[in-house]
Image (cartoon, rainbow, N blue to C red):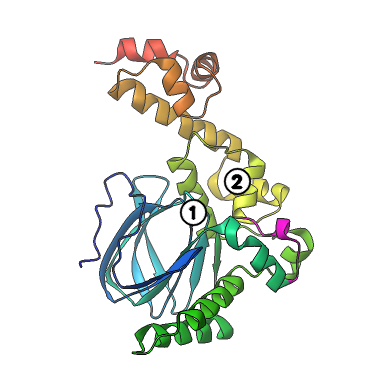
Amino acid sequence: MKQLMNISAPPRGELPAWGKRFEFADFFVELVPTGPRRINVRLARSFSSISFGPDEGRSGLAGDRLRRFDRRPYEYVVVPPNFPLRGESDDAPEVLVFVFDFEAIRDDVAAALRIEPDKIEPRVIIGGPKPFTTELAQRIRRHILAEDISADYLKSLCMVMLVDVMRLSESELTTGRGETLADDVLRSVLEYIDANVEADLSLEALARMSGVVTHRFARAFKNKVGESPHKYVVGRRIQAARDLLLTTEHPIAEIAYATGFSSQSHLTSTFRREIGITPGQLRERAP
């Protein structure tokens, strides 16, 4: 099966089976072969991957824009549920993929890390390469490719891998959050905002997703993006509402709720304050 999806279409809710996949109660693991790859999904469960070689390509940032990326072998990523995964690579390496129910494994991960379960949160994690994680990935790959596969052994290896990629640094174990906002994590947060304008995008929710303490997240976000998280979110919601107002005949109240505003009056007052006209006037002036 070609590893290609339409990256300009709405994201799919499931990941195609491109390689050897093994299903367990709370997760599946898949070894995806090398080749050209395009991905465009937003999964209801958490996602993690680790690649076996270098990779170059383009990935999504804040909606339609795609920017180049350059990853080293054995770098890994973990993203929370309902997170948009969108990108393309002309010569993608072999990659190990995990799709898992975060809540179902939270207690086991916390027990393995010897911390309280509430300190393990769905968040973006980008890390590696690390010697232990690399060794685990290689063992899982060898077992998947072996003729005689022990499901119990494979499940155990995979659980150790999930624990390791969700392992927090010492500072994060102390505070529950880190102090710095990495550029890769910021790009992922921006894309999440753009794909989920109707969701809870409060400062605390975004900081929790990024794994950064709230006041550090707010300061770093403004320094890197040029405006506060709140102002950025409002701008994306206004743009999403404008698009729906000009391309659909949906009632204004319905558009307000679909783009994260609490009511039609909230949408109207925000439009009037930010762009000088009401939603109704915008529609009236449209060609």
- SS for callout 1: helix
Task: Give the numbered dot on residue 188.
Answer: 1
Q: Which residue is mark 2?
A: 206
Please provide percent x and percent y for residue 278: 45, 13
Magenta segment boundaries in residue numbering:
114-121
Mark 1 or mark 2, which is nearer the start of the sequence? 1
Please provide percent x and percent y for residue 60: 38, 53
Is 74 within the magenta? no
Q: At 57% from the left edge and 37% from the top edge, which residue is drawn? A: 200
Structural distance between the alpha carbons of marks 2 and 1: 11 Å
* In the displayed structure image, the side of residue 102 where residue 238 appears, left or right: left
Q: Nearer the viewer, residue 253 or 245?
A: 253
- SS for callout 2: helix
State yes or no: discs 2 and 1 in contact (Cβ < 8 Å).
Answer: no
Query: Which quadrant of the figure has residue 125?
Result: bottom right
Total numbered badges shown on the rendered structure: 2
